Structures are given as C-alpha cells and as structure tokens.
Image: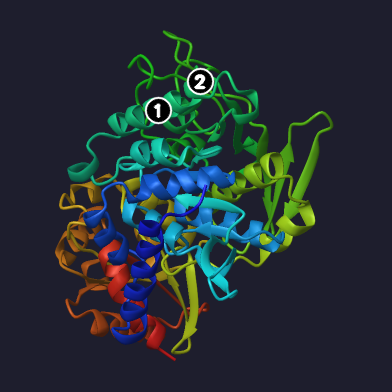
Amino acid sequence: MFLNKKQKAEIFFYIFLKFILNKILKREGDVLPAHILRKIDKKVLENFAKHITSLGIPVILVTGTNGKTTASNIIAETIKLSGKKVCFNSNGANMTNGILGAIIGSYKLSKSSSIGAKGIAMLDFKFSADIIVMECDEKVFPAVCSILNPKIITATNFYRDQLDRYGEVNSTVFEIKKAVKKISEELKNNASKKISLVLPSFEPLAAFLGYEINADKKYFGFDESFFNPNYSNDINSVEMELSDAVTCPNCKNMMFSSKDGTANRFLYDFKCEKCGFAGNEPDIKATQNISGSLTFELKKEKPCSFAFKPALSGDYNAANYLAAYSILKYHLNIGDDIIKTSFENFKTKFGRSYKKKAGGFEINIDLVKNPAGFAGVLKKLTESGSKVNILFVFSDRAADGRDVSWIWDVDFEKYKDYIENAVISGLRPYDIALRLKTAGMNPKKITVEYNLKKAVEAIMDKAEAAGLNEKKIYILPTYTELLRLKKYINGIK
C-alpha cells in the first residue's frame, strides 16, 4: 500500500508547521500540527494506521494511570539499543493528537523506486520505524486501540485520577476492557495475530483486563521478599496504597484476600469469593531489592533470574521495569545483556524521577496527579529515613483536574515527620498548606510563595540553611506546573 497525494501533503504540512514552532517560536511542536490536521481531515489517523498495517509494523500500546510514560520510554529505548528503529511519543503526549504527531513524524524523505520523466529518481516518504511503542491515555485508549490494532497491550495500573475528567476508575477500566475484548475477538480465529496482554498480577483493576479474554497473557508482580520489612511493619498498609479496587471489578462484590478472607493483600494475591475473579501467579516477579540492585525471577520451563542496578528508584519504578522486561524478554526476545545495559543507563524524561545537578543541589522532580502516585513518590523520598526539603507546585487548571479534593486521600500523616521544610506554589498552594497542617506538620515549616521562581529560590535557601547531609531538594508539581518548571529549571546552572 502506497501513500496517496493527500497523505504526502499532510506529512509536508506537519513537518513545515513543526519547524516553525520549534525553530522560530521556540515551542514544542508535536501536538498542534496534528490537532490542525485532524480538524482538516477527520480520518487522518485511520488512514495512516492503514498504511502502517499494510507495512506489517507491530504496535505496542501502554496505558494506565501512573507509570505509562516511564514504562513506554524504557521499552522504546531498549528496542533502539537492540538495533531497531522505534516510533514512540517520548515526550508523554499521549492523547490522540500526540499519537498522530509521533506517527507522522516518523515518515522521512527518501528516494523512491519510481523514476521521473527526466530519468531522475523521485523523492517519497518512507515510514522509518520497525516497531511502534505508544503511551496512550486511558480516556482515548478505546478509540486509539480500535484504529491502531496493537499486537501487544500493557497496563501499568488503574487508580482514581481527575474524577472531573474521567469519572470513576471502574468506568474507565470497563471501557478499556470492552476495547481489548473487541480486538481479541476479531483475532481469535487467527493464531498468528493473537493479541498479547502484559498485566500486573498485583493490581485487580488492571489484571481484570485479561479476565475471560482470549489472548496470550503474561503477568508481572512482586514476591513478599521484595519489600523491606524495616520500612513498615504494617505490610497491608503498603499493599492498600497500590489499588483502588475495593470491590470486585467483575461482579462488584467486596474483594477479599485468597489467603484468609479478611484482609486485602493486593500485592500478592486476591480473590472474589462470589464470582471467582482472582489474581494470577506472576510469570515474572521482583524478588529482591538490596543495595540498589533489583532481582527478577522468571517462571519459564527452566526458571531463571535477572539482576541489575536500576537507574530509577522506588517501588513504582520497579513495577515499570517489570512491565518493560516482560515485553522485551517474552515478546521481543531481546537479550538480557542489552536489557541490563538499557535499564541501568535509562534517562528519564522531565518530571518523571528527573534529576539535575544545579545551584549546588541535586534537584529531583516527580509529577504528582492522584493519591496513589503522590503516596508512591512520598514513600520513595522518605524511605531512607532522612529528612527532605520539598517544593509542592499545585494547580487546578483543566489538564490538572479541577477537583483538588483528592489530596485528602494522600496519607501525609505518615510522611510529615520526614519533611524538614515545605514551600508551596501554584494556583492552589493553600490547599496543600492546609492539608499539611491538618496532617500535623509544624506550620512554621510551611511557606507559601505564589511566584514560581521565588518559590524555587526559597526551597534552595531553606535547604541550605537546614544543613542536611544530603544536598537535595525535591519538587512535586502537577501537570501544568511541570511544563512551567521545565524552562526555568533547565536554565539553572
């Protein structure tokens, strides 16, 4: 199947407009050109998807509430290291426009096999990738899935996130499952094109995507030995942070542990006593997290293990590595030596466990946007037992979610004693300030500063004055504030 004249013109338009945005206006230009194209041609994504399908390019879709940017980038960067060319939305533009932009941006000018009237080789566009890895927002996943017809789908987790935009998390999962079921049924009579699902064994809502679905399924998860017992004696409190599935996603019955029927143990097992929906034994699981080294064990014909020193810390990043390894090892057959090199040298995108040495400090930036993600970041920051200096940049613009009540579901009480100083900026700083005060933090340690530049300077000054052993500051912004921070932080020497 060849590109038609209209598609070639659309590629030219995209490249030209992106050049104007990048080089002249100094703006990121992946989304706006695609947005305009979709206004002009409502079937533009469908038409390019048909061309990609005709070329036999496999598609991997990564969705979920937290971790999809990091997981998809780990997968894509490892594939690149293996020698293949990858089309992926590395900047986290995961709505339809961002996905379209990544696809069109992968078409490159090349010499055509056709010869012009004067015997000169014609120029044409060629899709320059061997494989597509796309991070996909939960809300647009059903539509994108039906268009791109992915070969592999992985879900990281599903949590309550921006209820004003998405509604209840169970409704989101239900729509995604319908899309997965539809594509699996379309392929059920073609074994060579059978869809593959890579899902967490420890999170009921994401695991539910594979329940009673005709697909090749692989599950990743954790062994009880993975978690450090010295961090928390209340292991169930850790487990409960990792799921919003209070009821069974299949029958709405209360979800109980399959071990004793009284406590939810979502990290290791779960079972609904009414309908039988239950967790699966992981095909790959994290078993050790010792001295900065992770160990994964694989359930294969001959069990084996994989150990590496991850570039990213935190339990939630261990889950991202698990998801990536499951795809890279089981489905793409990439060797452990390549995977290890990639995992240990992975560079995060801005705002996703991002680090930078500047102003005499190590600046750490993590996006926070929902209770589970916020709790995971706070756990990572404080698990060493050392006190930390944090800048919270909290806003309620449309992309952040207008409803800010979710911060009351973050267990600040658990982490307040680890926060040496808190500076708060953004459009809604007093919401975070009130939440910290209510949690029991000393109000004298809380500073509100609306000016973002002054807020960054304030946390650096307070960190300097605190004289802690580790010269680190942590910045936790919501999404729109992350975009505002990027230019300023990159400018600090």
Closer to the camera in the image, 410 or 41: 41
323 relative position to 23: left or right: right
Amino acid type, label 2: Ile
Residue occupying the point 57% across, 47% down: 55
**Is any atom of residue 93 visible in this view?**
no
Query: Which comes before the other along the chain, label 1 or label 2?
Result: 1
> Residue 418: percent from the left, percent from the top?
41, 63
Residue occupying the point 67% across, 62% down: 342
Q: In this view, does 341 lie above or below 52?
A: below
Local crowd at mark 1 within 10 Å, few (<14), some, or many (≥20)? some
| Residue to which mark 2 is pinned | 213
> Residue 290: percent from the left, percent from the top?
69, 54
Numbered disc total: 2
Q: Based on the displayed image, in which of its 4 quarters is residue 80 positioned? A: bottom right
Amino acid type, label 1: Lys
Label 1: which secondary element: helix
Q: Quadrant of the C terminus?
A: bottom left
Residue 478: assigned label? none
Closer to the camera in the image, 444 or 391: 391
CB-based contact (under 8 Å), mark 1 and mark 2 = yes
354 relative position to 294: left or right: left
> Residue 88: percent from the left, percent from the top?
50, 58
Q: In this view, does 21 lie above or below 59?
A: below
Q: Residue furthest toward the top?
A: 274
Residue 177: assigned label? 1
> Residue 310: percent from the left, percent from the top?
64, 60
Q: Residue furthest toward the right?
A: 302
Q: How is the rendered protein coloured?
A: rainbow
Label 2: which secondary element: loop
**Is any atom of residue 486 visible in this view?**
yes
